[in-house]
Amino acid sequence: MRTLRVLLAVLALIPMLLLLGGTPASAANDGKLTLQVAGDGATGVTIRAGYADGHELTNLVRLVLRATNDNGDVVGPIQLNPSGEGQGFYTTGPVLSPGRWQVTVSSPAPNPAEVTVAVEAKAEQSAPKPAPATSVALPEQTGLGAGVWWLIGSALLIAAAGSAVLLARSRNG
């Protein structure tokens, strides 16, 4: 009985410890952001934003992208909106042409940050073409065919019905 009381007391304390144990993420961070910028494998850019102290981004921040390629072509400034793929995740969609780009993503105050990375934009690949349809010869059936099984099943059903009729007559007569 004592073990049960101790177990119940521990189980009652767990929710309280979870509520009181941690400090809020907004109180722990200093407002500085880290930005991880990379190409998306095609002609877009993905950005992962978080606080410099490692906490997850809990509010929306304004991010702006600018990019310049080796030919001097410029893209941006483009204001980025959060993606539905996770907290602090931003995507541009297809904004770059194929080639090598210097991409700069920045965030103004109150969360200032800026990062510049080299991104290799590649033309989007098309889906692979399906293999041409070929006919496959099925192996010949050996043993009893489907027609024989239907015949056997029907015979068994008739025999069972006949047996039921004979059994009913013998009980009545």
Image (cartoon, rainbow, N blue to C red):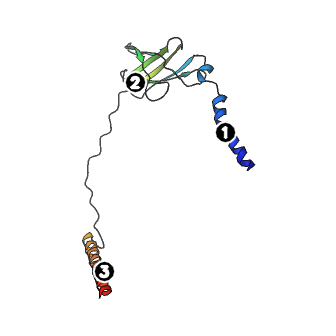
Element class at badge 3: helix
Give the tally of numbered discs. 3
Residue at the spot x=63%, y=35% of the render?
Answer: 15
Q: CA distance from mark 1 to mark 2?
A: 50 Å
Q: Which residue is mark 3?
A: 164
Residue 69 in view in this figure: no
Q: Earlier in the sequence, mark 1 or mark 2?
A: 1
Task: Check disc 3 and give the amino acid type.
Answer: Ala
Q: Quadrant of the C terminus?
A: bottom left
- Image depth: mark 1 or mark 2 in front: 1
Alpha-carbon neighbours of circle 1 within 10 Å: few (<14), some, or many (≥20)?
A: few
In front: label 2 or label 3: 3
Task: Tell whether label 3 touches label 2 (CB within 8 Å).
Answer: no
Q: Residues within 10 Å of mark 3 (few under 14, many from 20)?
A: few
Structural distance between the alpha carbons of marks 3 and 1:
67 Å
Instruction: Please name the amino acid that badge 1 sits on.
Output: Ala
The image quadrant that residue 135 belongs to is bottom left
Camera-side residue of 98 and 146? 146
Q: Residue furthest top?
A: 109
> Tags 1 and 2 in contact by the CB under 8 Å rule?
no
**Nearer to us in this view, 90 or 151:** 151
Label 1 sits on a secondary structure element that is: helix
Residue at mark 1: 12
**Quadrant assignment, res 123:** top left
Reading the image, the residue beneath label 2 is 44
Work out whether residue 129 can be spotted: yes
Distance from label 2 to label 3 (Cα)? 76 Å
For badge 2, the amino acid type reads Gly
**Position above or below: 117 against 134:** above
Report the residue at 32% width, 34% height from top.
126
Q: Position of residue 134 (x, y in %)?
A: 26, 52
Picture layout, residue 164 above or below residue 129 = below
